[in-house]
Image (spheres, coloured by chain):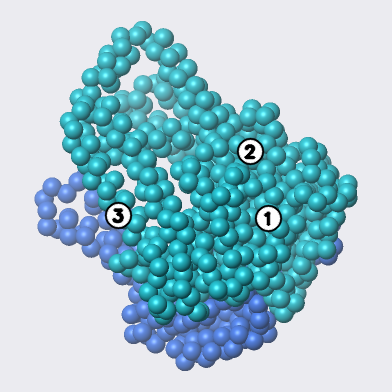
Chain colours: A blue, B cyan
Amino acid sequence: MTSIDPSSGGGPADLRLRAPEHRVAPRAILWWSLQALIGWLVVTLPQAGLLLFTDDAPIGAMWALWACVTVGVLHVAIMPSWRYRVHRWEVAADAVYTQTGWLTQEWRVAPASRIQTVDAKRGPLQQLLGLSTVTVTTASAAGPLHIEGLEHQLAATLVEELTATTQAVPGDAT
Amino acid sequence: MTGPEGTAPGGGPTPDQPSPQGPTGPHLGPAGVGPSQQEDAISPPKDEDVDQSPFGPDAPPPPELSDPDVDEWRRLDPRIIAARPLGEAAGLLWLLVVALFVGGDNGWQLRIAGVVIVILGVNGLIRWLTTRYRITEDQVLLHTGWVFRKHLSVPRDRIRTVDLTSPLLHRVFRLVVVTVGTGHSATSPDELSLNAVTAAEAEQLRVLLLQRARAGGEAAATKGAAEGAPPDGDEVGETSPAGATPREDGEPVPPPDQLSRLRRSWLRFAPLTLAGLAAFGVLFGTSYQALEGLNVEITDSSVLAGIQEWVTALPAPVLVAVAALSFLVVMVGGALVVYVVRYWKYELSREHDGTLRVRRGLLTTRSVSIEEKRLRGVEVVEPLLLRSAKGGSADAIVTGFGALSGDRDLLLPPAPVTEAHRVAELVTRTRPAPTLTGLARHPSAARRRRLVRTVVPTLGLLGGLAWAVVEGPVPVWAGYLGLVALPLAVLLGVDRYRNLGNQLADRYLVGRRGSLVRRTFALRTDGIIGWKVRRSLFQRRAGLATVVATTAAGAGHYEIQDVDVARGLAVAEAAVPGLLTPFLTEGPRPPVEHHADDLSERDGRRN
């Protein structure tokens, strides 16, 4: 293996990661919206309750509530569609490739030969919407790869496919 | 599994029930008289022949252990019935002394202590009675527990490390805790502990378990396509002479190859480690918490009250001097004590069975064996204080330690940083040491980010301080004092940037970051099992990315922070050829960074 010459500037100047091939299910937007909405309701409702039902709410409680509501509305309005544009996945011949995030984005590549387990799971909201999250675990402590918001059927097929690929490769994936 | 008529060794269990089945197999003592020679081989009579330190200087000859079919359920050494409860009670003894000292003698502490000791003793007995282990052809099994029974099994070909630890009381009884590590795995436990066996048996287990692991590893290496070239297994014979200055001179010597050992002069680095302060803090914290828990009224103590009275009577300058002096004494003295306790008789060696072995410890002795084939790299760690004195330590990047491995991956305690790089060179068999690779500097946008990250929070804090000064609760001089933080923040940011670097050396991905603790990792490229590229909004605007190599070894992920995207991807692609290829394109040139700038900066860098 050759080392990269420090004076070469590190290869082609315009080397970039391309986007993975597939988008997730469009219903994922709804799922992320609901998730965010529930999260913000948990934060804002007790505050609103405090303001409505007590007389001696601390000074600034009103401001805090308005701040939370503003950030919350912006978050629920912007995040899900942004996320949908970012979240993509691809299963190539010998690797799984995902792109996730919105403000901070993350690209991950895991070679099929290093995959330890593959599973699909559905939270209550996802069950309601017919979505699944596929989790691909490698031996690394860096955490598993997640493909969120896939159709049930597609997720099941994907898990089967990846499990078959993984089992075809011997070794302990470390 | 057969059911032989086990006869117990001295102090062992009574003869068995005839041929029981299942998990609670025959009660064969650790020195069990088995039906075959092999069984004698793995567990010879031990009480007499252990006249050496827990870890003998040399490994016993492996041939007698070469047959792995020593397939019997064994008990731990019966002496553990006494040793472990005593050790646990000793931990409480400290609290008892403190309680008596500051809380006055009420007598009830003693009664509680008595009850606790009885409980610990009974627990120890039950634990011994219910614990059995067995080494089959391909697994290490451990059955333990009384109310909650636990059955652990570890595949032998996944064993990467063997840790022999002997706390003080275990040493009195010549016992050793054997911990085998397998690395992160989704399907089996990370590690398995035998607490405890005799020193001689521990040594034999170490050799046996690592032998098997190596055989398994070789098999996997030939099968697995993803497994890179096995690291230089045939170079093992080409060892350097054991001695004060081991170098790769190529003179084969029978005893294990000593790579490094503790020098007295290294003690000068001890006070720079802050370990003394940390130890003191922990000691203080736990005692205080325990006393709170025992409802001992600390302020009642006449001793402490006397000290307090004496201290408050001192004039202010003297008080400051006394405080500074005691701080210094605690820091230096404590650090020296901690250093000696941890690293006494430190020795790093390469054994003939293809393992690296670190031995150390004054009270608790420790011997960690790392299968060399599983070594995935080295990390040189330089905390700021140590770095200022040209000191540093080295850790192994290795599969086989769980996330909570503590300092088990230590290769070199705080020492001259040249020694750290020398150790890196020796254990990786790469010359010059991969950690000494000339690193490419990151683009200047990275400097801006480091500065923003340190200066902006400082400005926030200063704003708060200014508000507090205006509002009155804080004196003005404290506000001016706070301004000192600003240049410090700038210096920190600049130093962080200066320390950023990356390079692909031969077979090693090398990266560096950090200021308060600077870490330089050299990760074997065949240990990389995936990539993660992270870009925040700001990083995208600046054309930067954080490229993370994921691996099963060490911390699991090694970051190249704020690298130019194209450069980071090029390094990643070259490190693991082919993995990223299908996902790369040559898009439009990133608008922000200019490589010409990086070049000029880089040329000024060392090389």
The residue that disc 3 covers is B122
The residue that disc 2 covers is B345
Marks 2 and 3 on same chain: yes
Q: Give the mark nearest the N terminus, 2 or 1.
A: 1
Q: Is residue B237 left or right of residue B497?
A: right
Q: Give the mark nearest the N terminus, 2 or 3.
A: 3
Mark 2–mark 1 Cα distance, whole angstroms, equals 20 Å
Report x, y in % for residue B478.
41, 23
Give amino acid for label 1.
Pro
The residue that disc 1 covers is B60
* Disc 3 residue crowd, few under 14, some 14–19, many 20+, Cα 10 Å: some
Marks 2 and 1 on same chain: yes
Q: In the drawing, what numbered circle is on residue A38?
A: none
Q: Residue at x 41, y 9 (%)?
A: B318
Give amino acid for label 2.
Lys
The image quarter containing residue B44 is: bottom right
Report x, y in % for residue B229.
78, 69
Give amino acid for label 3.
Val
**B375 or B535, which lies in front?**
B375
Which of the two discs, 2 and 3, sits closer to the camera? 3
Circle 2 sits in a helix, a strand or a loop, which is it?
loop
Mark 2–mark 3 Cα distance, whole angstroms, equals 36 Å
